[in-house]
Image (tube, grey):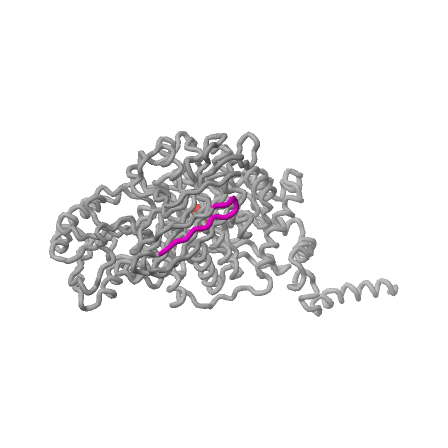
Amino acid sequence: MKPFIVLRLLAALAAPIMITAQSPEAVPYRNPRLPVEERVSDLLGRMTLEEKVDMVSGGGWMESKANARLGIPPLRMADGPVGVRNWYGPSALTMRADSPLPTVTSTAFPAGVALAASWDPDLLREVGKTIGEEARALGRDMMLGPGVNIVRAPLAGRNFEMYGEDPYLTSRLVVGYIEGMQSEGIIATVKHFAANNQEHERQTIDAKIDDRALHEIYLPAFRAAVQEAHVWAVMSAYNKLNGHWCAENSWLLTDVLKKEWGFQGLVVSDWLGTHSTAETANAGLDLEMPGAESIRRLRAAGVQQNPGDVGSRGAMLTPDKLLPLVQSGDVPVGVIDDKVRRILRVMFANGLFENQKPGGGQVDTLTQRAVARKAAAEGIVLLKNAGDLLPLVSEKIHSIAVVGPNAAVAVTGGGGSSSVKTTHAISPLDAVRERAGSAIQVSYAPSLPEAADLAAKADVVLVFAGDSPKVEKEGQDRESMDLPAGQNELIDAVVKANPHTVVVLNVGAPVTMPWVEQTPAVLNAWFPGEEGGHAIADILFGDVNPSGRLPETFPRRLEDSPSWGHYPGKDGVVDYADGIYVGYRHFDKQNIDPLFCFGHGLSYTKFEYTDLKVSPQEVTLKVRNTGSRDGAEVVQLYIQPLAPSIDRPVKELKAFRRIDLKHGETSTVTLTLDDRSLAYFDPAKKTWVTDPGKYEVLVGSSSRDIRLKGTVTR
Ligand code: BGC
């Protein structure tokens, strides 16, 4: 044998031995001390085209595909956004009492709208972090939330999951949540990009929205998630936007998200929300979910993702479809490389190669529950409190009648993919009994005629009314803004029987309140998570002073709402003719008196505002707690352009701060303005513009309770 052949043979034999003998860190992509981008490039360079293409469409229902040869782990996902939901299948299966799938439980936090009602980015940071902790404990890498679609139509089924009607408020809150979650090494996924503002025909509807409304209303929260919170994943929406499916909308995914905003993470499809191969791949979608085999099994079992869902497709980027298009040049190799690069970047940056989260940690601990209780209490909104009926003074009360369909059940959240199964949830009835103790007699009747009889005999009546996860849910909009059948009649009868009645609502969206004039006290507890009962009792008995504020307007009637006449669409298209006039922008413009305005929420104490000082960058004022209890105030700053050069809303929220003040305490509040505070999106120039001139600075306790005014000149 010639010597060089011997050498080559030896080398060939030795090569694998040398690699296995190397420490893993000698392979650059396995070395955690190297920069992420270096590791990504190294690993990408070792992959075959087939292996790259294989990574672009999912593995299981909630897992991306792994690569055993190179040791690439799967991304293990779970819904979000208010707790770690069962990842073994769609809610249609996991929520069934006789579900054939394994059970997963975790802490159920309050719904998005309840969190938003806190107006407290720090609270959202704490909730995001705690959910991240639980995801880690359960061995998941990526959470499918938060949802930041703006509440446009009061009947939209998933309003309860979102952060309300205002882009500024939503942006501030989502940044807190994502920062908290990602600080735990858990990948957050902001969804649904973009304009998934209704469930009616959600998988086929084409949302027609002008450029200005998109930039001023529907996109800012996504931009904040990307540019400020550095979110690692964005989920494309099911619907079409201006004629193109969001999953294959290159304007949205490439021009805006990746090029203009500089997004470095991955775009994941909504589940079964892809419709084409080349278009989707070329438009900027990076990871299609779920895996084709899961879809096949779901279809074989005749299970729908959610009731009412039609038009979904999925399994469009599978290797059998995608590889030939790459080989023919219809999908450039560079496009595939970019997708794999993004997926790997997200994995390396979040330590997936090093510390595969083993699971086995603790969830729903007392500490985690305490966060859920605090969050629920902060979000509860005291809508009305005539004659200071609340808080209940235990020493003066001997009997409480608890009535209504939502009293003995803990309605923790709405229906669909956000519903978290929990081992523990306290109903309002149990929590009131626990707090009332033995000195107060608590009696209970769900409905008539016993409810009115009980009410007549009690010192105080608590009516627990509202929706259920069957009414407010994913995949379906509500039929009307009224409470479910019989509840208005029940409240009427109870209030007639006893004027000392408090109505506690469990709703994730506005409802009509035909009984509101006669009813002295109304609380909205939203869908408050597993500790909701305790939080409600905390507020009712004054252990916690209410500080929640409405993140969306409650109209008197559906006809007053901005989308009236332009919802739910016709012939597959919903025309957002309301443009930028969403929520309070519409009520102000049309001078319509809402039932409860944006930013509204009462306290058991009073706050006085003085000493306003205004500059173009900073606004300061003093706030004093003049009442006899400690409490928190939410100071809100709105900007009103005095001589706008184009049509503009009467006023817009541009800063806010929630502050805790002891009774008698005064604090200086500083609110900062930035270069977007006075600006609008000019559709002709396709950019943000600030007109020179005067702007009124309105500072108050709600959008219609303005206490101080100043002027700023630009
Ligand atoms: C929902 C998403 C969810 C996904 C996975 C879809 O139907 O729209 O919000 O994350 O299912 O459960």
Residue furthest to the right in view is 2
Q: Is residue 162 visible?
A: no
At horizontal 27% and vertical 57% (from top left) the residue drawn is 409
Foreground of the two, 180 or 118: 118
Is 329 placed left or right of 450 in the picture? right
The relative height of residue 699 versus residue 378 in the rendered view (above or below) is above
Is 260 placed left or right of 27 in the picture? left
Quadrant in which the N terminus is drawn: bottom right
Q: Is residue 615 magenta?
A: yes
In the image, residue 366 lies at what x, y percent? 38, 68
Q: Name the chief secondary structure element in magenta.
A: strand
Foreground of the two, 436 or 599: 599
Foreground of the two, 441 or 672: 672
In the image, residue 463 lies at what x, y percent? 21, 53
Query: Across the whole image, how many numbered discs are drawn on residues?
Result: 0
Foreground of the two, 547 or 665: 665
In the image, residue 194 lies at what x, y percent? 48, 41
In the image, residue 82 lies at what x, y percent? 41, 55
Q: Is residue 316 magenta?
A: no
Q: Is residue 126 visible?
A: yes
Is 159 placed left or right of 357 in the picture? left
Is 355 placed left or right of 113 in the picture? right
Q: Which stretch is magenta?
A: 614-624
Query: Which corner quadrant of the image does residue 545 belong to?
Result: bottom left
Query: Which corner quadrant of the image does residue 9 belong to?
Result: bottom right
At horizontal 25% and vertical 62% (from top left) the residue drawn is 430
The relative height of residue 66 versus residue 273 in the rendered view (above or below) is below
